[in-house]
């Protein structure tokens, strides 16, 4: 009887733990594998990325009253093994397929950059009063969700690693990136450019800071040590 | 021939640049977004149109042209912007297509006053002609097909009017300007008018009103007859994805050149009056548009002293469906009809009625580079050439 109670309690705790982890993790962010090394630091974004602009609305009968989001666009920091891909220690813990969300709000994709693992389903809800039409012509994932209105959402399963550029067919100033990885060792920088990747298995890696498609800073690191501070810069 | 070769070279250059991913994909901005530049290039090839069905007011086929446009928006202050667009067709003259100031007295309120060479108030397609929102290559008949009417030359009689049936691409009448020249479409989308426009939006309703120098069918920079055109439009977003619009336009059509030749008849006003109804519905991978326009010109006939009411009605139905990501198919079916007039030889429509069906497809080479292909079938109840089938291809790029 005690054994049964112990097993039941253990199962409930495990289930509760899984539930809490899944619910609390930020959308699209990888769940850090237990143990392993930690890589942290700051990405200094020195390049000037033009703020999104609407095309000159010469033919429009009314200019939009909606200001476009001009916030800082984050970088994505990720690891790549220097080993051949099949022997990569990064693959030792397969990524957990999850769910993420890229909102369409004030004629802007929010977040502008989404980093996810292969197998993640991304929802594209429309929070604007106007129609949107999310699509991508990227080789990694080609899709067209069609036009839908406020309160509606469509989902895309990202089943291959790579970079996917996302656009709206109605509003040409709307664009975003989805970066799809076949492991869990990546993260997006916060508002100050800081990043942290935990649970890195021992091995030799290249660390890449990626920003807006064209700018990268790549370094080679080896773990252990158990924790490493590494500042990166994209220009 | 030189221009066709130049167009072909430009066409190939664009495709080559596209494959190398060197084309800009976003508008170019300066001064923290105060100055924004955009552009578009459309290279269209098609065989010679022996029936002149696809000719526009610039004396060439709209299905055989290289069109380059550059647009700019300068935000002078929080309330005032300057907007301009210059265009060149077939590498000929560069013309200022649009040039106006937009004043928004109350920021964050949908109330604008626009002054200068302004966008058309009337109709739906009038503002879509050059954009990627035209899923096909050709334009609707109402906005492109040239009737035989001219503001600067008038027929002396109904008999003379009927002799010009199906000859709108090079029309000639005995009263007024003697040189043959293109007639006018019901509503011009290839030229914009000059004047003042007020736009107000309240919730799902947008109201537009304007006073301009030209007319719906003959937009102008300067006034040529002392009369103004008043136009109004109301658009209601009736449901998600559904917009219903209605338009009205009335203005003096006959120019001073023709009025001077009319003598005592010239004391009256000879207006063009037009009504329009349009609808756009989109959902999922579908987009459908419907537009109907009725235009009425009052034309004086010197031989009888009468004023002849000449009506023309156009109806157009268009559909677009996205087959797979980056590939769509589209179709447009339309009819352009004319009221009948009495002449010694009998009663006939004052110009030859036209039917047109265009079927095509588009392929996105990249987000802002589309290859379109279409076949346009034209049929006319009059003229030397009554049927023309025009296959066409277009490469459209914008940033």
Image (cartoon, coloured by chain):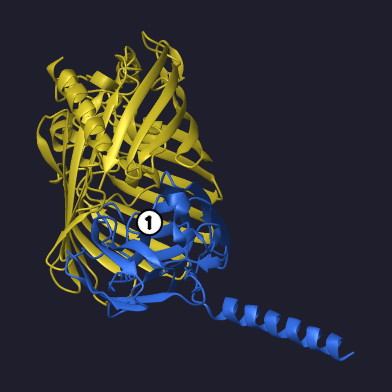
- How many marks overall? 1
| Image quarter hosting the N terminus of chain B | top left
Q: Position of residue A95 (x, y in %)?
A: 53, 63
Q: Position of residue A76 (x, y in %)?
A: 34, 66
In the image as oriented, which residue stretches furthest toward the left?
B93
Based on the displayed image, in which of its 4 quarters is residue B28 positioned? bottom left
Q: Is residue A53 visible?
A: yes
Residue visible at 42% across and 59% down in the picture? A178
Q: Position of residue B288 (x, y in %)?
A: 52, 43
Q: Nearer the viewer, residue A211 or B291?
A: A211
Q: Which residue is mark 1?
A: A171
Q: Say whether residue A231 is left or right of residue B129.
A: left
Residue visible at 12% across and 40% down in the picture? B95
Query: In the image, is residue A163 above or below residue B355?
Result: below
Q: Is residue A196 visible?
A: no
In the image as oriented, which residue stretches furthest toward the top?
B384
Residue visible at 43% across and 66% down in the picture? A185
Q: Say whether residue B221 is left or right of residue B199.
A: left
Which color was chain A given? blue
* Chain for disc number 1: A
Which color was chain B given? yellow
In the image as oriented, which residue stretches furthest toward the bottom?
A2
Q: Nearer the viewer, residue B381 or B27?
A: B27
Q: How many residues crowd around disc 1 within 10 Å: few (fewer than 14), some, or many (20 or more)?
A: some
Q: Say whether residue B217 is left or right of residue A156.
A: left
């Amino acid at each position: 009887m005690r054994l049964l109670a112990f097993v039941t309690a253990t199962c409930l705790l495990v289930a509760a733990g899984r539930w809490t982890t899944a619910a609390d993790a930020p959308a699209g962010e990888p769940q850090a594998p237990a143990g392993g090394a930690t890589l942290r630091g700051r990405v200094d974004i020195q390049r000037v990325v033009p703020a999104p602009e609407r095309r000159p609305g010469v033919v429009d009968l009314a200019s939009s009253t909606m200001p476009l989001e001009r916030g800082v666009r984050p970088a994505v920091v990720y690891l790549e093994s220097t080993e051949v891909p099949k022997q990569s220690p990064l693959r030792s813990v397969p990524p957990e397929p999850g769910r993420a969300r890229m909102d369409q709000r004030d004629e802007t994709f929010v977040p502008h950059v989404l980093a996810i693992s292969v197998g993640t389903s991304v929802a594209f809800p429309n929070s604007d009063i106007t129609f949107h039409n999310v699509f991508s012509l990227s080789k990694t994932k080609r899709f067209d969700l069609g036009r839908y209105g406020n309160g509606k959402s469509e989902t895309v399963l990202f089943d291959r690693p790579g970079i996917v550029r996302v656009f709206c067919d109605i509003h040409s100033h709307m664009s975003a990136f989805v970066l799809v990885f076949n492991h869990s060792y990546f993260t997006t920088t916060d508002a100050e450019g800081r990043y942290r990747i935990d649970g890195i298995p021992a091995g030799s890696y290249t660390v890449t800071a990626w920003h807006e498609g064209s700018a990268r800073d790549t370094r080679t690191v080896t773990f252990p040590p158990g924790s490493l501070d590494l500042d990166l810069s994209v220009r | 021939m030189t221009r066709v070769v130049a167009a072909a070279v430009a066409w190939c250059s664009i495709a080559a640049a596209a494959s190398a991913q060197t084309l800009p994909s976003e508008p170019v901005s300066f001064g923290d977004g105060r100055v924004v530049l955009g552009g578009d290039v459309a290279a269209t090839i098609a065989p010679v149109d022996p029936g002149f069905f696809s000719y526009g007011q610039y004396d060439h086929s709209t299905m055989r042209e290289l069109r380059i446009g550059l647009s700019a928006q300068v935000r002078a202050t929080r309330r005032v912007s300057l907007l301009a667009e210059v265009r060149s067709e077939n590498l000929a003259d560069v013309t200022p297509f649009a040039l106006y100031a937009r004043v928004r007295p109350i920021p964050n309120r949908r109330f604008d006053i626009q002054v200068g060479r302004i966008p058309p108030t009337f109709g739906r397609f009038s503002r879509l002609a050059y954009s990627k929102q035209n899923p096909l290559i050709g334009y609707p008949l109402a906005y492109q097909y040239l009737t035989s009417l001219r503001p600067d030359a008038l027929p002396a009689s109904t008999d003379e009017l009927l002799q010009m049936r199906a000859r709108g691409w090079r029309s000639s009448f005995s009263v007024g300007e003697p040189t043959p020249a293109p007639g006018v479409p019901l509503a011009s989308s290839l030229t914009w008018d000059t004047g003042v426009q007020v736009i107000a939006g309240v919730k799902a309703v947008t109201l537009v009103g304007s006073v301009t120098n030209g007319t719906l069918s003959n937009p102008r920079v300067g006034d040529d007859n002392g009369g103004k055109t008043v136009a109004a439009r109301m658009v209601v977003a009736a449901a998600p994805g559904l917009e219903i619009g209605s338009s009205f336009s009335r203005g003096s059509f006959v120019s001073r050149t023709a009025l001077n030749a009319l003598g005592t008849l010239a004391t009256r006003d000879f207006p063009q009056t037009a009504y329009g109804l349009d609808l756009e519905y989109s959902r999922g991978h579908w987009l459908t548009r419907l537009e109907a326009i009725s235009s009425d010109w009052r034309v004086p006939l010197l031989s009888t002293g009468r004023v002849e009411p000449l009506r023309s009605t156009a109806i157009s139905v268009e559909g677009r469906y996205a087959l797979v990501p980056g590939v769509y198919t589209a179709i447009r079916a339309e009819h352009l009809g004319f009221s009948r007039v009495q002449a010694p030889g009998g009663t006939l429509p004052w110009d030859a009625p036209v039917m047109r069906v265009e079927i095509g497809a588009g392929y996105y080479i990249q987000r802002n580079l589309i290859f379109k292909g279409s076949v346009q079938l034209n049929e006319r109840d009059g003229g030397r050439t009554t049927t023309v089938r025009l296959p066409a291809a277009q490469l459209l790029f914008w940033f």
